[in-house]
Image (tube, rainbow, N blue to C red):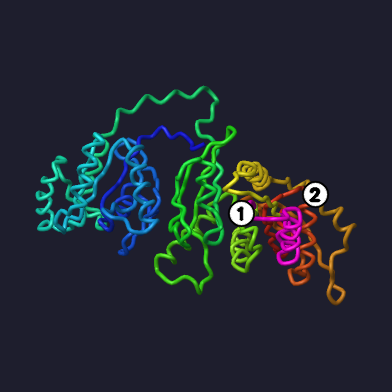
């Protein structure tokens, strides 16, 4: 179920290309939402947290409101906007201060009147004193004082934020923490990644049992990495729905470059990646690239074969997929895999059992004493390689970090350690200590450590 957030919500709305996403980024103090001159960049509801004068609240950026949406994605965007209206405590209505009011502006005004919620009117793109005088024209909307702002140049935001927090409902008293109580629960960050149309957004919607993100057959429907709080079986998760990662040759617009950059950043900041692969198509070259990027960054991973409802002989197909992983990517055999179906809801929540297991492994630490005792038995089991009579020697091994899980080996000469021997050490570490779904990084340093 969606995680209940006690903070009030402020929804930003308006026509396309009036500067909603730029204002959103200013309000939360981070460059989170994609900003571009092209209309319709924002599609899903995009949430963040803001604080002003000691008052914390959530902010949601929404897609542009249209009078006559023509395609399926635009129509679904309008549904997302109305969902934000229903949840919001305060609505910031953004208009283009350099343009005359349009028919759509008046229609939005009428809809906001009917909602009966507090509305703060922002006349954006007024970035010099002469232009700011134009804000008086927006009194015609009858929504009270229009606030002249320039989100791009960070002008007029103080007065706007003052008006927002003045419109928020009274803050309830926070319950006092019991002695020794940990106030913040641990949240596992899970990036949902994969090729376009593999079922990432459908997975999110299925587990939430609501259309939280837009799903459409059009490739590239999801453009930004969207954070969604989720609570299940007493645990808190932050699900990061990402844009589908195409091959470089398929990336044609600047917006797609932004989307891919956000997806890569989501992989880097995630605790666990749920890597989705089409069970019908099998492992593609693009899947291998995405898995490789997660492995390179040391991000723990679970492989999820989607669209399992479309598979005929499932036992045979499951074995074929496992064999494909073993043959084409044997170095990621450490990653567990699961089959699921967004349509039939098979094993959707079992995926979180896998995520929890992998998360536990990603936080595992092995003491230095235990590691060096382990390595003594390893020397007996497999003699280190040698070159021209010079044997590779490990003086000392220690785990230096998690996320990524990193071990440092102090050695006599790096050149003596062939890749195959390092792979042997990694496999033995996994046999001894698990590390399910966790990439292991081995670093070599010459010379014995100082005592």
The residue drawn where x is 38% and y is 54% is: 43
Q: Which residues are magenta?
A: 308-334
Of the two numbered discs 1 and 2 on the same chain, state the one appearing first in sequence.
Answer: 1
Nearest to the observer: residue 423 or residue 218: 218
User: Residue 319's x, y, as percent?
Assistant: 76, 57
Is residue 325 a member of the stretch shown in magenta? yes
User: Dot 2: what SS?
Assistant: helix
Regarding residue 301, the answer to whether it shows in the image is: no
The residue drawn where x is 44% and y is 58% is: 221
The single residue placed furthest to the right in the displayed view is 380
Tell me the chief SS of the magenta region: helix
User: Residue 281's x, y, as percent?
Assistant: 63, 63
The single residue placed furthest to the bottom in the displayed view is 388
Relative to residue 193, is residue 232 depicted above or below? Answer: above
Q: Which residue is mark 2?
A: 432
Q: Which residue is mark 1?
A: 307
User: Residue 316's x, y, as percent?
Assistant: 76, 57
Left or right of 338 on screen, residue 57: left
Is residue 188 a member of the stretch shown in magenta? no
The residue drawn where x is 53% and y is 35% is: 185
Regarding residue 355, the answer to whether it shows in the image is: yes
Left or right of 298 on screen, residue 373: right
User: Residue 62's x, y, as percent?
Assistant: 34, 49
User: Dot 1: what SS?
Assistant: loop
Q: Nearer the viewer, mark 1 or mark 2?
A: 1
């Amino acid at each position: 179920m969606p995680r209940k957030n006690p903070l009030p919500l402020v929804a930003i709305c308006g026509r396309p290309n009036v500067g909603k996403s730029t204002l959103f980024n200013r309000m939360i103090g981070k460059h989170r939402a994609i900003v571009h001159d092209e209309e319709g960049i924002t599609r899903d509801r995009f949430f963040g947290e803001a604080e002003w004068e000691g008052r914390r609240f959530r902010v949601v950026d929404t897609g542009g409101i249209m009078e006559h949406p023509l395609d399926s994605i635009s129509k679904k965007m309008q549904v997302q906007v109305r969902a934000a209206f229903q949840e919001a405590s305060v609505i910031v209505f953004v208009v283009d201060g350099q343009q005359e009011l349009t028919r759509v502006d008046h229609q939005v005004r009428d809809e906001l009147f009917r909602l009966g919620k507090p509305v703060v009117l922002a006349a954006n793109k007024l970035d010099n004193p002469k232009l700011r005088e134009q804000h008086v024209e927006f009194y015609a909307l009858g929504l009270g004082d229009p606030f002249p702002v320039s989100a791009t140049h960070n002008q007029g935001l103080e007065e706007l934020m003052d008006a927002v927090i003045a419109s928020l409902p009274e803050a309830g008293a926070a319950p006092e923490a019991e002695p020794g109580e940990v106030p913040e629960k641990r949240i596992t960050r899970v990036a949902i990644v994969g090729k376009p149309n593999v079922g990432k957004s459908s997975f999110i919607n299925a587990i939430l049992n609501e259309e939280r993100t837009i799903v459409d057959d059009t490739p590239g429907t999801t453009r930004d990495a969207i954070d969604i709080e989720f609570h299940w079986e007493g645990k808190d998760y932050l699900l990061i729905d990402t844009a589908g990662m195409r091959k470089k040759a398929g990336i044609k617009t600047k917006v797609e470059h932004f989307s891919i950059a956000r997806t890569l950043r989501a992989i880097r900041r995630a605790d666990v990646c749920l890597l989705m692969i089409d069970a019908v198509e099998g492992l593609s070259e693009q899947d291998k690239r995405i898995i490789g990027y997660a492995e390179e960054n040391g991000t723990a991973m679970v492989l999820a074969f989607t669209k399992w409802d479309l598979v005929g002989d499932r036992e045979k197909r499951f074995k074929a997929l496992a064999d494909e992983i073993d043959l084409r990517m044997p170095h990621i055999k450490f990653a567990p895999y699961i089959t699921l179906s967004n349509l039939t809801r098979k094993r959707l929540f079992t995926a979180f059992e896998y995520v929890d297991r992998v998360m536990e492994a990603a936080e595992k630490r092995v003491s230095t004493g235990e590691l060096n005792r382990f390595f003594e038995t390893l020397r007996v089991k497999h003699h280190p390689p040698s070159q021209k009579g010079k044997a590779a020697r490990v003086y000392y091994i220690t785990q230096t970090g998690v996320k990524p899980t990193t071990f440092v080996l102090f050695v006599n000469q790096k050149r003596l350690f062939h890749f195959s021997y390092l792979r042997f050490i990694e496999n033995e570490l996994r046999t001894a200590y698990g590390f399910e779904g966790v990439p292991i990084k081995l670093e070599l340093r010459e010379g014995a450590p100082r005592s």
